[in-house]
Amino acid sequence: MSAVLKSPSDADASVPEGTSTAAETDGFHLVIDALKLNGIDTIYGVPGIPITDLTRMAQTEGLRVISFRHEQHAGNAAAAAGFLTAKPGICLTVSAPGFLNGLTALANATTNCFPMILISGSSEREIVDLQQGDYEEMDQLAIAKPLCKAAFRVLHAQDIGVGVARAIRAALSGRPGGVYLDLPAKLFSQTMDAAAGAASLIKVVDAAPRQLPAPDAVARALDMLKGAKRPLIVLGKGAAYAQVDDQVRAFVETSGIPYLPMSMAKGLLPDTHAQSAAAARSYVLQEADVVVLVGARLNWLLSHGKGKTWGAERGPKQFIQIDIAPTEMDSNVAIGAPLVGDIGSCVSALVAGMGKGWAKPPAEWTGAIAERRDKNLTKMAATLALNPSPMNFHSALGAIREIVKANPEAIVVNEGANTLDFARSIVDMYLPRKRLDVGTWGIMGIGMGFSVAAAVVTGKPVIAIEGDSAFGFSGMEIETICRYKLPVCVVVFNNNGIYRGTDVNGSGGEDVAPTVFVKDARYELMMQAFGGEGCTATTPAELTAAMNAAIASGKPTLINAVIDQTAGTESGRITSLNPSAAKKKA
Ligand code: FYN
Ligand code: ADP
Ligand code: MG
């Protein structure tokens, strides 16, 4: 407990001179103490009015304070830390504009079910509410509310403990998500008796309580599974987040059912696992008759559970869905066997119910999948063996695939269009929660923020595989990476533009096309500017050497990987979402 000794000058008038001074605390220290009491050890943020002193004092009191160049990246770091640790990541911003900059990350965290708390300073309530034009005036609480899971404001120092506790519980319990905590400037300098302050803090007990599935729901799910001829398990990032890796593995292996990992669930079981159907994705989605969703939503990434992708012409599928959020059920298609509860409890209940004599899926099904998978793997191996000049996505990613195989504990951060889509299928993951990417929204700009958090939280090497466009959104944060000497190796897939570098201006005018960047940009010089290592790679061999050096040294590194500017398709694998593609279909 930190306390500030009351100085004689601000002694309470009722205390006679010469009496021993009572220890006092203030809003700043109560916020810090409340966070520390709840096991929070890091704050990601950008200092400024009114929270500059809060960052200084937090550092003095032993919290790690990671200062960014822009709040969005601090927010993304907090969100990634939340996903990796299952503790809320804390982002700290200044009022109005800083708050708004952090809000994209807060909304993205909520969309992805990552626990984070955006703490923002705010201006004087009395002036803001009368709209009298305060410095950075904005009704931040009202603006945050629809974009996050819960939003709270604390007006009195004695309520800081409750405010922080409510924020933590809201972020972690049930479906995790983003929480906003509004702390007006005046709160920080409020003082109170230190002992009373300490007593006002709350250590949150059991913030994410286990939620056991109802026995009849388990029986219903097992009945449905027993009748399956072509069962499939889909593992989502909720299953990765839950940190019940052994239970998930036991469910997959005891059932013998083929599984499909969603992007951030890759590595929950190694991608080389015999039951992985990742390389037969289209086939299993079309052909499966009973599908078990484990912490995965039937949103756009799974084609809403219907249509051609799901073999609509073969008749409807049956779904078992494991999720902590009861209202997720039936969001897109009927869920015949909802299993509401935490993933650990649900999969354990299923395994217990399967008993010893559980019949594995028919060999006809697993054999057909293996055949498709092996065909795709062979095709992929042949493509990766090519060594075209200039280097393309496949040959560069073939090199990275080997680096990740040799360093399975490294965390892969991945964003872009083609860079994302190719990396997802080419770069195998071997351990849980080692892949962080654009997630549910397909957001661009998470790259450097996620990388910072991954390095800070795990201390392991981070490999950021970045499209040149994607990198631009958070590129300035390489200064942050250098400042904190983080073991991050950024590989920029430089093909001179968004999707490709070859687009032309339809008007014949002087401006380049909207998707085209400066040709042959020297991204590596940016890293050199801040004292990191920067180099160019034009061949897979050069890329391999540079990445190995980066991992061995642990030094911040940026590799400008020069890719054929004609490589890449519009929007990667989601071209069909472009309105012009939809028009052609019609
Ligand atoms: C997968 N595949 C493989 C392997 N893994 N082949 C060989 N070897 C390996 N290891 C095959 C797989 O069976 C598929 O082939 C194909 O590769 C692609 O697999 P993927 O990537 O798993 O599946 P797909 O269809 O791309 O997934 C759909 C999606 C995905 C919507 C889930 O595209 C996605 O996550 N997109 C996010 C896009 C995004 O957010 N972009 C940012 C915005 S960019 P087939 O089975 O033959 O189909 C703005 O422009
Ligand atoms: P993906 O994009 O990988 O398919 P989603 O983000 O769509 O994953 O889905 C994750 C799901 O996991 C959400 O519906 C969320 O409610 C659920 N979830 C998160 N944590 C848990 C948990 N501990 N137990 C059960 N469900 C969880
Ligand atoms: Mg590009």
Image: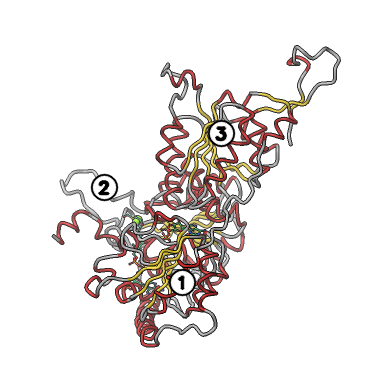
Q: Is residue 539 visible?
A: no
Q: Earlier in the sequence, mark 3 or mark 2?
A: 3
Q: Are marks 3 and 2 in contact (CB under 8 Å)?
A: no
Q: Which residue is mark 1?
A: 219
Q: Amino acid at mark 1?
A: Ala
- Judged by depth in the image, the label closer to the viewer, 2 or 1, is 1
- Judged by depth in the image, the label closer to the viewer, 3 or 2, is 3
- Horizontally, residue 132 falls left or right of residue 246, namely left
Q: Quadrant of the C terminus?
A: bottom left
Please tell me in which quadrant of the rendered image residue 366 appears. bottom left
Q: Which residue is mark 2?
A: 514
Q: Amino acid at mark 2?
A: Pro
- Horizontally, residue 268 falls left or right of residue 160, namely left
Ligand 1 is found in the corner quadrant, namely: bottom left
How packed is label 2: few (under 14 Cα within 10 Å), some, or many (20 or more)? Answer: few
For this rendering, which residue is in front, 299 or 409?
299
Residue found 62% across the figure and 45% down from its top: 42
Q: In the image, residue 317 lies at what x, y percent? A: 31, 71
Q: In the image, residue 382 lies at what x, y percent? A: 37, 79
Residue found 65% across the figure and 38% down from its top: 34
Separation of residues labelled 2 and 1 (CA atoms)? 56 Å
How packed is label 3: few (under 14 Cα within 10 Å), some, or many (20 or more)? Answer: many
How packed is label 1: few (under 14 Cα within 10 Å), some, or many (20 or more)? Answer: some
Q: Amino acid at mark 3?
A: Pro
Residue found 85% across the figure and 17% down from its top: 19
Q: Which residue is mark 3?
A: 47
Q: Earlier in the sequence, mark 1 or mark 3?
A: 3
Numbered disc total: 3
Separation of residues labelled 1 and 3 (CA atoms)? 53 Å
